[in-house]
Image (spheres, coloured by chain):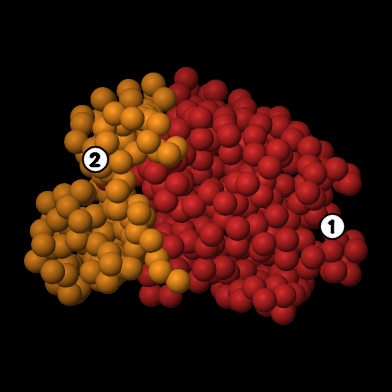
C-alpha cells in the first residue's frame, strides 16, 4: 500500500510525517527535556551551553536561539514539542500561533474571537478562492 | 457483568485546564464555555459511573518520539500528573482500575488489537482536562480511570475506521468482564483547530457541526473521513477527532444525544462536548 501525501497541498501546514521525523528527532528530544524543571533552569541560565548537549544542526540551533517558531517547523520541529520552549518563555499556544501566522498578538486574538481563520481560501496552496474545490 | 452505559466526547484544550486552575472561568472570555459544561457535570454526577475509559493522546509527556505506541492502555493502580513544561496541573492523582484494564488489555490483544501496555505513566492535559470539564474541581476524582492513548502526534495516526473497530472490541471486552460495573467511555480531542504554521487558527464550524450530527445519524460515514480531509477541513490538529470514533464504536448502533455544547474559541480551538447514551439504557 502506498502512502498518499496529498496533505502537501494544504497551505501553511507542516505535517509531522516520516520525512520530518527523520530530520526533527533530536530537535524534538531537546524540547522534551524541558519537561523537567531542572533542565528548564539550565536552559534559561545558559541557552547555548544547554543546547551543546544535543546534536542539533546549525539551522535547528539558530531557530531555537532566535525563537523562530515557523523556522523550527521547517527543520523538523513538531508543535507539541517546540511549544515547550514557548512555555519556558512564559508564552501560550495562542502567542506562538500568532507569531507563526505573522500577525500581532492582538490581531490573532481578535480573529479567534471572531470565529477563527476560515477554511475558505485556505484549503489548497494553489487555490485561494474556491471553497467548492475542497468538495470536488 | 460490566456494561458501557454512555459516551462523552470533549475537547481537551490545555488552556481550559489553566483557566480552571487559575480560577478565571468566570471571565467574559471563559464564562460562556464553562456555563455550557454545567449540564454535563450534572448529568455525569447523576449517572455516577463506576469507572471511566478515557481515550486521549499524550502530548510529549508520558511518551517522547523515542517510542511511539499507536494504541496504549494504562493498567496501573495510579497515574501521576505530568509536568508538561510548566509544572504539573494542581489536580488530584488519577486512580486506575487494574482489574478491568488488564482484562481489556488481554481481551483486545486476543481480539487482534495489538495494544501496548503501560504499567507506569504520567497523564497530561489530554486526560485531566476532560476530567476537569466533566467533574469540576475536586479533592479526588469521583471514579477510577483507564487511560487509553492514541498516537496523533506522529503522522499517521490510526484511521478513523480502525479507531471505531477498536471501540467495538472494547465493547465486547467490557461486556465479558465478570464484575457489575457501569462504565463510561470518553473520546477526547478536537474539534477543529490548527496550532501550527501560517494557517494556525483555522476553525471550521460547518465541519464540526456535521461531525457532531453524524455521531448519532451516521457514525460509520464519519469513519471514512480521511486524514487529509481532517487536516484540510478541520486543521492539522483537528485530526485528533479520530479518537471520538473509539468512543462511538464502543456504544450501541443507536444512541440518544443527551447533550451538546459547542463554543468558539477556547484559545485556538473550537471546543465541543457531546453526551451520548445507549438506547438500551443505563
Q: Secondary structure at mark 2?
A: loop
Same subunit, labels 2 and 1: the answer reads no
Q: Which chain is red?
A: B
Q: Find residue B222 and report its horizontal and vertical position in percent.
A: 60, 46
Look at the image and tell me whether residue A124 can be seen.
yes
Q: CA distance from mark 2 to mark 1?
A: 50 Å
Residue under label 2: A126
Colour of chain A in the image:
orange
From the viewer's side, name the closer residue of A2 and B27.
A2
Q: Is residue B57 left or right of residue B51?
A: left
- SS at circle 1: strand
Residue A67 can be seen in this image: no
Residue B267 image point, x, y percent:
41, 35
Q: How many neighbours does mark 2 have within 10 angstroms: few (below 14), some (14-19), or many (20 or more)?
A: few
Q: Is residue A97 left or right of residue B207?
A: left
Residue to which mark 1 is pinned:
B3
B279 displayed left or right of B196: right
Q: Residue furthest front?
A: A136
The residue sitting at 13% across, 69% down in the picture is: A57
User: Measuring 51% from the left and 44% from the top, which residue is drawn there?
Assistant: B190
Total labels: the figure holds: 2
Q: What chain is tagged by disc 2?
A: A
Amino acid at each position: 500500500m502506498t502512502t498518499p501525501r496529498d496533505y502537501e497541498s494544504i497551505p501553511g501546514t507542516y505535517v509531522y510525517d516520516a520525512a520530518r521525523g527523520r530530520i526533527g528527532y533530536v530537535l524534538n528530544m531537546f524540547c522534551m527535556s524541558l519537561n523537567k524543571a531542572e533542565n528548564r533552569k539550565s536552559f534559561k541560565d545558559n541557552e547555548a551551553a544547554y543546547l551543546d548537549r544535543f546534536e542539533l544542526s546549525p539551522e535547528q540551533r539558530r531557530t531555537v536561539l532566535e525563537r523562530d517558531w515557523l523556522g523550527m517547523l521547517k527543520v523538523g520541529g513538531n508543535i507539541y514539542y517546540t511549544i515547550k520552549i514557548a512555555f519556558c518563555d512564559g508564552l501560550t499556544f495562542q502567542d506562538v500561533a500568532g507569531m507563526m501566522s505573522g500577525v500581532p498578538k492582538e490581531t490573532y486574538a481578535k480573529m479567534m474571537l471572531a470565529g477563527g481563520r476560515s477554511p475558505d481560501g485556505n484549503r489548497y496552496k494553489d487555490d485561494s478562492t474556491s471553497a467548492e474545490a475542497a468538495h470536488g | 457483568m460490566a456494561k458501557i452505559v454512555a459516551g462523552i466526547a470533549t475537547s481537551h484544550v490545555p488552556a481550559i485546564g489553566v483557566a480552571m486552575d487559575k480560577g478565571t472561568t468566570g471571565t467574559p472570555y471563559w464564562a460562556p464555555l464553562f456555563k455550557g459544561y454545567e449540564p454535563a457535570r450534572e448529568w455525569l454526577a447523576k449517572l455516577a459511573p463506576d469507572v471511566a475509559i478515557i481515550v486521549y493522546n499524550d502530548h510529549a509527556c508520558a511518551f517522547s518520539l523515542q517510542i511511539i505506541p499507536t494504541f496504549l492502555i494504562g493498567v496501573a493502580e495510579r497515574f501521576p500528573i505530568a509536568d508538561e513544561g510548566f509544572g504539573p496541573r494542581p489536580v488530584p492523582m488519577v486512580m486506575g482500575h487494574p482489574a478491568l484494564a488488564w482484562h481489556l488489555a488481554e481481551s483486545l490483544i486476543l481480539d487482534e488489537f495489538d495494544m501496548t501496555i503501560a504499567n507506569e505513566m504520567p497523564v497530561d492535559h489530554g486526560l485531566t482536562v476532560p476530567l476537569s470539564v466533566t467533574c469540576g474541581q475536586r479533592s479526588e476524582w469521583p471514579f477510577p480511570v483507564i487511560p487509553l492513548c492514541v498516537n496523533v502526534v506522529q503522522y499517521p495516526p490510526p484511521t478513523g475506521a480502525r479507531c471505531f473497530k477498536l471501540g467495538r472490541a472494547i465493547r465486547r471486552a467490557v461486556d465479558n468482564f465478570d464484575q457489575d460495573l457501569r462504565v463510561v467511555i470518553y473520546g477526547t480531542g478536537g474539534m477543529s483547530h490548527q496550532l501550527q504554521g501560517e494557517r494556525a487558527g483555522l476553525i471550521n464550524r460547518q465541519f464540526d457541526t456535521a461531525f457532531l450530527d453524524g455521531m448519532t445519524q451516521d457514525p460509520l460515514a464519519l469513519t471514512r473521513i480521511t486524514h487529509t480531509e481532517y487536516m484540510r477541513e478541520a486543521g492539522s490538529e483537528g485530526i485528533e477527532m479520530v479518537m471520538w470514533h473509539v468512543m462511538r464504536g464502543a456504544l450501541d448502533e443507536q444512541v440518544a444525544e443527551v447533550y451538546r455544547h459547542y463554543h468558539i474559541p477556547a484559545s485556538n480551538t473550537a471546543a465541543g462536548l457531546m453526551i451520548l447514551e445507549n438506547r438500551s439504557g443505563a
